[in-house]
Structure formats: C-alpha cells, structure tokens
Amino acid sequence: MYRSHVLVCGGTGCTSSGSAQILAALNEEIKKQGLDKEVAVVQTGCHGLCALGPIMLIYPEGTFYSMVHVEDVPEIVSEHLLKGRIVKRLLYTETVTDQGLKSLNETEFYKKQHRIALRNCGIINPENIEEYIGTGGYEALGKALTTMKPEEIIQTLIDSGLRGRGGGGFPTGLKWKFAAANKADQKYVCCNADEGDPGAFMDRSVLEGDPHVVLEAMAIAGYAIGASQGFIYVRAEYPIAVKRLTIAIGQAREYGLLGKNIFNTDFSFDIELRLGAGAFVCGEETALMTSIEGNRGEPRPRPPFPAKEGLFKKPTILNNVETYANIPRIILNGAAWFASMGTEKSKGTKVFALGGKINNTGLVEIPMGTTLREIVEEIGGGIPKGKKFKAAQTGGPSGGCIPAEHLDIPIDYDNLISIGSMMGSGGLIVMDEDNCMVDIAKFFLQFTVDESCGKCTPCRVGTKRLYEILDKITKGNGTLEDIDKLEELCHYIKDNSLCGLGQTAPNPVLSTLRYFKDEYIAHVVDKRCPAGVCKALLTYVIDADKCKGCTLCARTCPNGAIEGKVREPHMINPDKCIKCGACMEKCRFGAISKK
C-alpha cells in the first residue's frame, strides 16, 4: 500500500514540455531516496490547465505543482515526499490562500466545470486497464449486456437528450435507432477521432487520458444496433493517442471485454484502428468512411445516409470521441441524470479547447448554457496584458466569430447558430483588440482552400475566389463592390456544396461581415487596417520629439530602412521598410508607432 501517489501529466502538451524526462527523473530519485515502496508514480492524461504544464499532483495532500522542470525533481522528492514539506515556489498560485492551500475544485479554472467526458483524464493511468475498471470502467457495458435490451439502450440515449459532439448536434439516440432498424448481415460502429480544427485538442485529450471509455461506449453501441465490428479513425499526427488506443484495445481483448462472447453472452464485438493522413475533409462522415475503405477521402452524396448505407455499404453509425465518452455514464446513471444538466434543447456538458488571447489556455468541460463571459473572464482568466475582448471563434473553420455584444449569451447549439456561429467540435479561440477580423476570415479561408478535397465546384472554386477577394482587401486593393461579392458568393457556396466542409466554409466571412463590417470598409475606403495587422496597409513612423538618436532601431532593422545620425532624430524610408515591426519592439523610448 503506497502512502503517496505522484500524478504526472503525460498528455501531448506536457510531454512537449518535458514531462517524460520528469517521470524518468522522478522514478530514479524516488528509488535513490529509498521511497520506491512508499511512493507510486503515475503517468496520467491531460489535467486541462495546459498553460501551466508540465503539471504534477501529489496525493493524499492534493498538492498541485505547475511548470515543473527536471531540475525541480530532487527538491520535490527530498522536501515533499521525504520530509513532508511542500515546495511553495512550484505551487499553482490559485491554490494558495492566507488560510493555507485550497483544492483545485475551488479555483476559478475548475470550480464551474463539471467533468463527465473528462472525468478520468488526469486521474488514472491510461495505459492500465485496471485503473479504468477501478473507477467503474466497463460496468456500463456489463449492465447493458446483462440487464438491458438494445431498444432500452437506444431509448435511454434518446431520453437523455445527448446530441453529437462532433459539430452537427444530431440526437445520438435517434441516429442509433435508425441504424438498428435497418436489417443487414453486417453493421459497423465508427468513431471519428480525426480532429482537424485549428486549435482543437478535445478528442485527443480523451484518447490520451481515458481510451477505454471510447472502447466501452463503442461496444455498447455495437450491442444496441446489432454490429460486431468497430473502427476508430484517428489522426496519425496523434502518436500518443494512437499508442494508448493500441494498448487499450490489446488489454480489453486480454480481459475478454472485446472479442467473442463478452461477459459470457452471445454478443461479440471487436475494434480496429485506422490512421488518417491529416485531411480535414475526412472529419466529414462519408469521407471518413470512404477513407476507411481504402479510397481517397471524398464525401458521398446523401441520401442514402450512413445509418442505411455507410461503411462498405452496410448500416453504420458514426460518433466522435466526446460523444462516446458520455455514454457509459448515461447508461450507469440514467437518462434523467444527464438531462438534468444543460439547457432545454442542449443537454449535458461540452468540452472546449480554450486558446488564443487568453490567460488560462487549456481544456474545459462546462454545462451547456454557461455564458461566453464566464468561460473567458472566469474560467479562462481573462485577456492577457489588460487587452479588451474583441471576439471568440467557435467551431473552427466551420464556425463564426462571436463579438463582445454577445458575451453573455448562454453557449448551446441553438444559441450559437442564431448569432451566426456554431458549436463545432469545441474549439474556442479568443481574440483581442489587436486582431484584425478581415485577416481572421482570410486565415480560416486559406485553411479551407488547402483542405478542400476538390470534388465539388462550389467548394473547390468558390472558396478560392473568396480567399482571393479577402486577400485583395487586406492588401488595400479592395472595392465596396468586392464586399457585396463576398456576401453573394458565401451564400452560393453554402447552398450548393456537396458536404459540410463547403457548406460551412463561408461562416467566418459571413460572421465577420455581420459584426465587423466597419473593418472591411476601413480596409477598402480608408486603406487602413484598424488593428494594425495587415502589412500592406501599415506605415511605421518615428516621432522626432521622442527619438533620442540612440541608433538601436537602425541597428535592429534587417533591411537598412532607418536613417539618421547619432543623437539626432531618425527617419524610416518607406520604400525600404518591410514592416516587420522589429524597430518598434526594440525602441526604449516609445518613439516608433504604426499607423
């Protein structure tokens, strides 16, 4: 029996900051101090507060150490684990009060969260099936197979109000019901783990921190619709997730939780991995299935829908990782438990990857109906450097920008659609006053142009034309007629594209036109970028009254664009200036500004 457990984050974020080296050093130092029989070291998944990684928690105290380095390990072992003295300099400051330490659940980042999909992430070793079983893992599968009929499972999901967390928000139970009703000699259960939105890492974190929850849910789905085979389509760029899924599938087979006659019933179900090559379009369900079949990932016309004719032309259900992560708890706790959370039409919780201009970058799981202001100002800790909130992008390239006037809108599927955005898979990128909204729209359009599969003309050609107009505007060559063309083209692409990628691609343009049209007009009429982002519209100037003639700016300039004598005001040659901003960054007297 161990007296202490040291939990070290082994998610992608912390791993990139050296958590693997910290784990190795920790095990070595613990053994050196003779504590290896008293202290257990556990590699976990993501704790959520990625801005403070690498993260280490020590129980039973619940001490939260942040930004830990290998050099800190000997001190942690000798002081905390050996002598019982907390290393105060490494503590997450939000847990420190005048009265002592407070728990993580009392901090601003965690106290408004409610973890269902993420309940085991950061708590268990994802590579040890016994730790998952120890937290109630596979109980839901056992309950489903031994005490429930397939139609009861489907009705439970319908009653729970669970909607797909992959972006569309289609009722999960209804999707399963359609697939169950279609008779076939073979059916399939698929998991979409092809998370392609810029800034999104929700599904990755679940797979890295709690892979068995997805396997368990997929097996339940197989029983509910009459399928014996599952496929998880995961990005090859997620090596840690792939590794842990591979381990989890092997362990589940070894324990008889995948394979033949699960729980001594006549139900058999197995799962295979399929690695995606990073094509954003393969997040669309029919393109994903086409890729699993070994073909180029291109969408197929619907109908027929996958519930009738999906993978290998057999009835198929496809849900994303977060959707599956909710299902075991719904089976164990009941539909009413899940439906008690959230809003009238959007039940339960939603995981968001919080990024951009925000202090607490990380992963959060909140009840549906939480306001954007609560997410940004409380959970997210506000905007760095005292800057003002300008907008939040939800739904990635498929979503839209939410302006400050809608900060108090409750976040759910229908509310976001009503203001020109969408839930998407859960990326939430915060922007401040230094962001140019025309440039933001251009960024997402460039991504869509690169990722279009090219199968249909509205998306292949239309998004390219949209990008060209936006590029023209950001370079100061746009006209008012171009703004009208943008809107017209957006509606054409939305109405005529084959799949969801093309149908939603214009959303960033339409939402920025709706809420930030003044910025478009400033670019076109005044030839000015209000945020000072678009280089073609910038001019750097030196204030002669403030300039001391120190020559630092001239020495910094990579293109020799600054002229002047020592102790005399300098000048910038606009013909040579490449608008890199290095001079303004280095000036110690605030003499350089951009206009």
Image (cartoon, grey):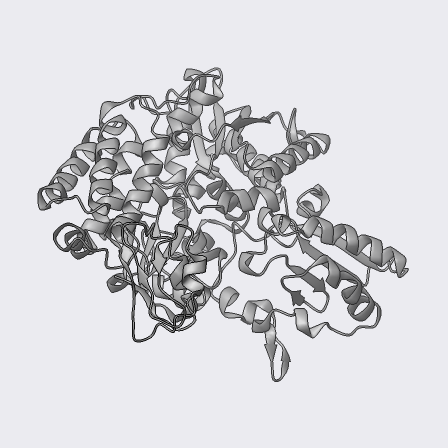
Query: Does residue 36 show up?
Result: no
Q: Residue 110, percent across and down?
A: 52, 64
In the orientation shown, which residue stands out farthest toward the left? Answer: 481
State the image quarter where residue 82 is shown.
bottom right
Q: Give coordinates of residue 258: x percent, y percent.
A: 64, 30
Most distant residue in the front direction: 565
Residue sitting nearer the eye, 435 or 254: 435
Rendered residue at 15%/50% (across/down): 524
Q: Residue shown at 43%/71% (left/top)?
A: 588
Q: Is residue 588 left or right of residue 483?
A: right
**Residue 308 appearing in the image:** yes
Percent of width and height locating residue 582: 41, 58
In the rendered view, tell whether residue 424 sits above or below residue 349.
Answer: above
- Give whichever of 545, 374 is nearer the camera: 545
Q: Residue at x 68, y 67 (%)?
A: 62
Q: Quadrant of the C terminus?
A: bottom left
Q: x, y (%) of residue 172?
A: 40, 39
In which image quadrant can residue 593 be found?
bottom left
Q: Look at the picture and state if 529 lies above or below 308.
A: below
Vertical order, 66 against 196 (above or below): below
Residue sitting at x 15%, y 44%: 478
463 left or right of 217 in image: left
Between 485 and 257, the one lying in front of the other is: 485
Q: Is residue 45 rendered to the left or right of residue 191?
A: right
What number of labels is visible?
Answer: 0
Q: Quadrant of the N terminus?
A: bottom right
Depth check, front residue: 66 or 480: 480
